[in-house]
Image (cartoon, rainbow, N blue to C red):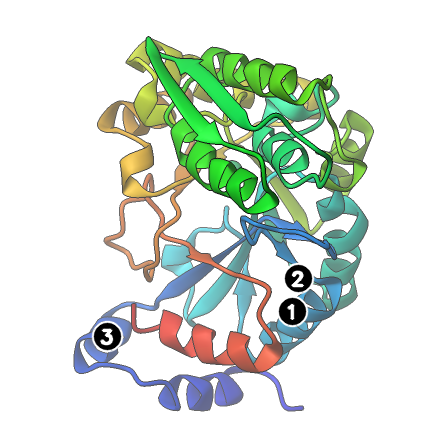
Amino acid sequence: MTTGITTFKSFLRSSIVTPLHRLLNAVDTPVIVLLYHRVTTLTSDPEQLAVTPENFRSQMKFLKDNVPLARFDDDWAKMAKPAVIITFDDGYADNVREALPILEEYRIPATFFISTGTIDTTGHFWWHELEQILFDTVQRPSRFTLQHDGRTTVWPSDTGEKRREVYRQLVPLMMEKDAESRNDCLSQLRRWANTGEIIAHCHRAMSLAELHTLAENELVTIGAHTVTHSQLTVLPPNNQREEIVTSKHQLETWLGREITTFSYPFGKRCHYTHESITACREAGFTKAAANFPGQIHRWTDPYQIPRHLVRNWSITHFERKLQGFWTR
Ligand SMILES: [Zn+2]
């Protein structure tokens, strides 16, 4: 397959580019940032975070054959051609085991935003423990009662479908809490299920040794993603600053290099505040990534960089979505 800009231009022309985007793209070279979380094969993935290695390889091959690829920490203003950037959030172990070999195969650079609190400590994210407890098929009590913020919420929980509904309601509810309140909710759930802390190997975060392996690869840039992966909006400004600065300093201590990029947990505009942006700037980050679609131009706020979330799409679906990304 031919590579380079000739193919890329025809690729862009085949897109349904609106007059406004055609004008903006002519005035300034657009950059598109893709957001991944996991590359692995799961039997259950309610948050749709995982892309299978087969689909990820097809997506990377398509990009390599058709689109200039740049780094998140590059100076995009100096780039002459439209480009795509690959990023990963959170710091799952499968990033090292399954994504990195494919990125190496196609020599594609990527930036990995790491939540430091899960590295070599608890080793997992709270949403997976919810899933492990509530999607289990064993017999559970007929009601789950949660005491939180002075309120009592009761859910029927005697069938698998009712427990999945508890999961669907608990995820957004726990996203609104700080780490301490979240841990309290998890403790109540464990008592209800009569279980200890559940860590599923397939969902584990990377170890410190795996983080070093990742960081030492020349294709890789490491960025910060807070300590506890809390929604910054629910934290007072001082706690936001602590989450942002501590994750930067911890990564710098571990890796012995300056960390200059950051991504906001969850990343929608409602998940961070003006204080979060100020804290990122004052901490010394030069770019911060969000999680809403959009093209990047010279005039884009470097502390609210749009990204397109990629799901487990077949190559046909990926091509169609990518064409749409140039118009959103
Ligand atoms: Zn995240």
Q: Judge from the rendering whether residue 103 lies leftward or rightward of residue 260; answer left or right.
A: right
- Left or right, 187 with respect to 207, comes to left
Q: Which mark is residue 302?
A: none
Q: Residue at x 39, y 91 (%)?
A: 14
Q: Marks 1 and 3: in contact by CB < 8 Å?
A: no
> In which image quadrant can residue 89 be found?
top right
Q: Marks 3/1: CA distance?
A: 25 Å
* Residue 256 at x, y percent in the picture: 68, 23
Q: Which amino acid does the dot numbered 3 rest on?
A: His
* Residue 212 horizontal/vertical position (percent): 77, 32
- Residue 305 appears in the picture as rendered: yes
Return the residue at label 3: 21
Q: In the image shown, does 51 or 222 lie closer to the viewer? A: 51
Q: x and y percent of residue 266 in the render?
A: 43, 39
The residue lying at 72 percent from left, 54 percent from top is: 42
Hey, what amino acid is under mark 1?
A: Met
Quarter occupied by residue 240: top left
Tell me the number on the disc at residue 108. Answer: 2
Q: Secondary structure at mark 1?
A: helix
Marks 2/1 in contact by CB < 8 Å: the verdict is yes
The 10 Å Cα crowd at callout 1, few under 14, some 14 to 19, many 20 or more, is some
Amino acid, disc 2 = Ile
At a point 36% along the width and 48% down the height, the residue shown is: 305
Quadrant of the drawing holding the N terminus: bottom right
Does dot 2 land on a helix, a strand or a loop? Answer: loop
- The Cα atoms of the two marked residues, 2 and 3, are separated by 27 Å
Where's residue 25, x and y in %?
28, 73
On residue 60, the disc is 1
Is tag 2's residue or tag 3's residue first in the polypeptide sequence? Answer: 3
Q: Secondary structure at mark 3?
A: helix
N-terminal label among 2 and 1 = 1
Is residue 231 shown above or below 236?
below
